[in-house]
Image (cartoon, grey):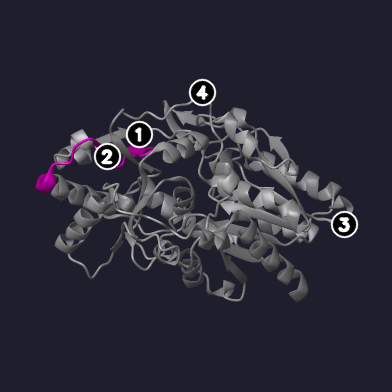
Amino acid sequence: MNESIMKNMLIIHPHWPPSNTVGVHRVRLIANELHSLGWKATVLTIDERDYEEDLAYETLQLIDKTVEVVKVRARPVVKILGKRMIGDIGLRGFSALKKQAHQILSERAIDFIWFSLPSWYTPLMGAPLKKRYNVNFGVDYRDPWVYKLATHQKGLNRATATVLTARVLEPLALREVSLISGVSEGYLKGIHERQAKLKHTAKLTFQMGFRKEDHTIHLEDFSPPFTKEVRTYVYAGAYSPNWYPIFRLWMKGLAALHSEQSIHKVQFMFIGTRNPELQSITELADEFNVGELVNELPDRIPFLQVQQILRESDGAIILGSTERHYSASKLFQCLVTAPRVFAFFHEASEGAQILRDCEASNFYVGFSEHLSEVELIRNLKQQIASFIDPTVPWKPKMEVLNAHSSHANAKRFIAAIDQLTQTK
């Protein structure tokens, strides 16, 4: 496509490959598709030398060659008496990102600016940039900025301070915003309830999505940490306070099944589940006497290693939230990659509907406030038993997922931006 007639999008996001954070992939998936839709993507990000997390350089091969990447340096982490006080990369890099954004906008024509959250601080520059350069901007929610604290988080503590700060900053970040997007209607509904003046602002939801090519890359020097002659089922993802009840119920369901039929030559592997606020997965398994069945690798591992683990596993496990708006972003990579998928999250969530649309709900258990714990544990026991039985068939209609591909998501995103121009 002739680049001289293309539109230009500036994507301001502190994390970018080789960062191994989850949010990198939503932004990357959209950026990769823009060129085919008549837009040139310029990603303004932080130099990886300033990241705190381990880096995954193999993920650089997941970036389309048409994406321009501009990097700036962030300030060092601020510690007081050895305690990390200012570490958020969006906060440490805010000044440098803003300065570079001004330079880019003053030197070339930019048609749209896009921020994806978290990090939470970057969209605070949106309104000033729009005012000075007359460029619309959008804010995308991968997670809710303002959220309900779990019971154990309440009180005079960091978690409470975080939510109170979010209530102050969110209205400032959304001043003059032209488009609000998110992975879930529930996230956007919360914004409407908090800020009535945004009820006429353009809204759009699209899931995390996927790009099939990302899930077929083989790493020659990597072997999944499986035990020979043991069927291995993998959960790879976060473990948060709002998900803890789901994990606890799942473990009770596994314990009920193990007590009834004594599971042999089966392992449930949990990857990336470290959370110092919560009882560890290992401790949870030991509490219910299923420790011999559970192997926890608490640290996050690189994205492409996770994909290879899922491909070579006997199945993937998705445990989510008790909230109706749970988006189950990892659902796509599991459906595309793993031999079969077990899922347990709210029955009214979009993820549940996607499973039904794909006829992939054979091993799905829906959480409902109307079901007792006894009923949920019984359902879990039955579905776990079916899931780990290799003779039980699982034949989803994968073509249904095409509606959630990164290309389909990017088309909806660009259509929403084009609509802004028409109504301007």
User: What residue sits 53% from the left and 60% below the top?
Assistant: 399
Nearer the N terminus, badge 4 or badge 2?
A: 4
Dot label at residue 5: 3
Among numbered discs 4 and 1, the one appearing first in the sequence:
4
Distance of mark 4 from mark 3, alpha carbons?
A: 43 Å
Residue 221's mark?
Answer: 4
User: Which residue corresponds to the image point at 20% horizontal and 47% vertical from the top-left?
Assistant: 254
Amino acid type at circle 2 is Ile
Q: Is the Cβ of the residue at disc 4 closer than 8 Å to that at disc 3?
A: no
**Secondary structure beneath label 3:** helix
Tell me the distance, in whole angstroms, between the alpha carbons under discs 4 and 2: 28 Å
Whether residue 89 sits left or right of residue 193 in the image: it is: right
**Residue 216, x across and y down, in percent:** 55, 40
> With respect to residue 128, does 264 lie above or below?
above
Query: Left or right: 252 with respect to 210?
Result: left
Q: Earlier in the sequence, mark 3 or mark 2?
A: 3
Residue at horizontal 29 percent and vertical 63 percent from the top: 367
Q: Which residues are magenta?
A: 259-278
Q: What SS does tag 4 mark?
A: loop
- Amino acid type at mark 1: Pro
Q: Which residue is mark 1?
A: 298
Q: Residues within 10 Å of mark 1 (few under 14, many from 20)?
A: many
| SS under mark 1 | loop
Locate residue 111: give its quadrant: bottom right
Q: Earlier in the sequence, mark 4 or mark 3?
A: 3
Q: Is residue 61 left or right of residue 320?
A: right
Q: CA distance from mark 4 to mark 1?
A: 22 Å
Q: Which residue, given by chain and number where applicable, does mark 2 sit on?
A: 281
